[in-house]
Amino acid sequence: MNSTQPLPKHAGLNRNVKLFVTLLLAIVCLTSSASAQTAKKNKASANRAAKQYTIEQFMDTVRVNGSSFSPDEKSILFSSNKTGIFNAYTVPVAGGAPKQLTNSTKESTFAVSYLPTDTRVIYTYDRGGNENSHLYVMEKDGKERDLTPGEKTKANFLGWSHDRTSFFFSTNERDARYFDIYEMTVADFKRTLLYQDSTGYGFGDISKDKKFIAFTKANTTSDTDIYLYNVATKEMKHLTPHTGEVAYSPASFSPDSRHLYSLTNEGGEFSHVARYDLATGKSEVVEKYPWDVMYTYFSRHGKYRVVGVNEDARTKIKIYDHATGKPIALPKLPEGDITAVNISPSEKLMAFYFNGDRSPSNLHVYDFASKKVTRLTDTLNTEINPADLVEAEVVRYKSFDGMEVPALLYKPHGASASNKMPALVEVHGGPGGQSRKGYSSLMQYLANKGYVILRVNNRGSSGYGKTFFAADDGKHGREPLWDCIEAKKYLASLGYVDEQKIGIIGGSYGGYMVLAALAFKPEEFAAGVDIFGVSNWVRTLESIPPYWESFRKALYKEIGDPKTDLENLRATSPLFHADKIRKPLIVLQGANDPRVIKPESDEIVEAVKKNNGIVEYIVFDNEGHGFTKKANEIRAYKAIHDFLDRHLKGKSLGS
């Protein structure tokens, strides 16, 4: 989970709830109804043969993320795995070759920010994927300084003060369960405690005048509250008393520190932007859409307000002139999504990423005055022709009870009624994650090798309203799984899928769904690919990282409490039903995974072997909950492809 940040549940509400419950580095994406243009593309794809590429060629594509402007705004700091592992890089705003700043060959290192007054940089990394990440600063002489030491300490960068002389961060060094909030001055790197947590609040934002801190508190995965802390008086005020299950999440204080902007689904299915007046205590609706608002925030001086909307598994960015409320025209780009907008401190430039299904994320910069867009990275391997890749189509199908389930369909070039291909149902992590449009090297690799893929947003997924989101609560191993069974039926109805050769694949919670499918519906899928998936809910819920304390109760409400729901948790845990698993299975596991610990995979593999099942097992000694190193991704994805070729494309499909 180091290199990919999962999407929030109820948009920004997700960030502190099912987002945290998200037990997966998702390898998925999805969308909705077919447009005439997409249909035309798909029809054309059936008539052309795509060149096939090796996994090494696919993984030679570079992953990039993050952005921070240098003090003179002539360079941007970002992260890249060009060397095979993530490191911090800088690139000129005018364009040019990126320069590598950190040179780690062991730990994936992620850029955080330039310091406001010079070329020193802050970055973060953990040890082998254990998620105990620290904040480091690279001094001018290139030496590294650990700002948050401690063997079991986990630290989070929370942002800069308005005057840029200090930054805020949180750490659980005092108590592994809770994150205290500090301010650290740039001049001497001395810290001051702002808030000591003993309740389990989730951080939201700090006002520009430093007088207030906004927090969220999870009651359940669908019911959250906002609390406001007065730094001077140490008073904690509950801003959102309510009845029923309503999600509230702090988004951003206004530039003048008079209002708190928040996200809430109060009074409707989707989250909207609301504004709370700190002086009067009155709230008002700012803007609504027929989709979840994922986030809203301001540029440094408040000239612009940025909004991200989760529109049918795509990110739609809106930028407003805060003074006038008028929308700002965004740069015209090809098909794809603008994401991760970062407006420079001077508010003259905007860094952002742009990606599509056939185009991995690339860093760009936009000049508001000249309207000029400059692309700063070129991440797709030049050996790969984008025309050989697949555009994901957003589709919907009816599940067993009539509920409409959204999904993303990848149809390989050349698939037709006369050339039927094997297929995969792919399940995202979560349980409250979402498969979204955008580039996925694994999905494109498998589609390029002739596998139809349906990335399912089963009930409980984010982005489709609070009723759909809560529809899986207490039902794991049953209704959400049945949505995946119906997904298989949908694939079989397409006419170009070999209905006898449909497998299931997923990571984390998606990996659990793979194991559940093979154990509870053993005749449905021809093979399963489990990537660090839960096999025993009892143990997983008892062994969650201590820093998940803030949403432990919400997680128990979603899945079950091991103290009171033991019978049900055993009934829905594949490990206790492994004797039913007869179809071929491959399991991949990070040795240092703190979320789904290694015994989860060890024991399911042993149980399947004990019952003479077909199972392959690969452990990655230097990974945690997800892949952050190219060599491991190559090894994992090639193993998955080889396994599927043997058991889906091959004649032997298991007993």
Image (spheres, helix red, strand yellow):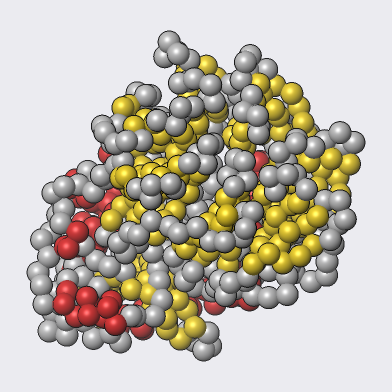
Q: Is residue 289 left or right of residue 61?
A: right
The residue nearer to you, when weighing 650 against 164, is 164
Residue 145: give x, y in percent of width and height. 52, 16
Residue 203 in sight: no
Q: Is residue 578 left or right of residue 162?
A: left
Where is 328 relative to 392, above or below? above
Rendered image quadrant of residue 39: bottom left
Residue 581: give x, y in percent of width and height. 40, 67
Where is 481 relative to 220, above or below? below
The residue nearer to you, when weighing 385 against 604, is 385
Residue 46: give x, y in percent of width and height. 15, 77
Rendered image quadrant of residue 408: bottom left
The residue nearer to you, when weighing 628 against 651, is 628
Residue drawn at point x = 70 percent, y = 21 percent: 191
How many numbered circles are shown?
A: 0
Residue 435: give x, y in percent of width and height. 43, 64
Residue drawn at point x = 83 percent, y = 66 percent: 242
Residue furthest toward the bottom?
Answer: 402
Residue drawn at point x = 62 percent, y = 33 percent: 160
Quadrant, the C terminus = bottom left
Q: Is residue 563 left or right of residue 599?
A: right
Rendered image quadrant of residue 173: top right
Where is 200 relative to 431, above or below? above
Where is 610 relative to 135, above or below? below
Residue drawn at point x = 33 percent, y = 73 percent: 393
Residue 342 in sight: yes
Q: Is residue 214 left or right of residue 15?
A: right
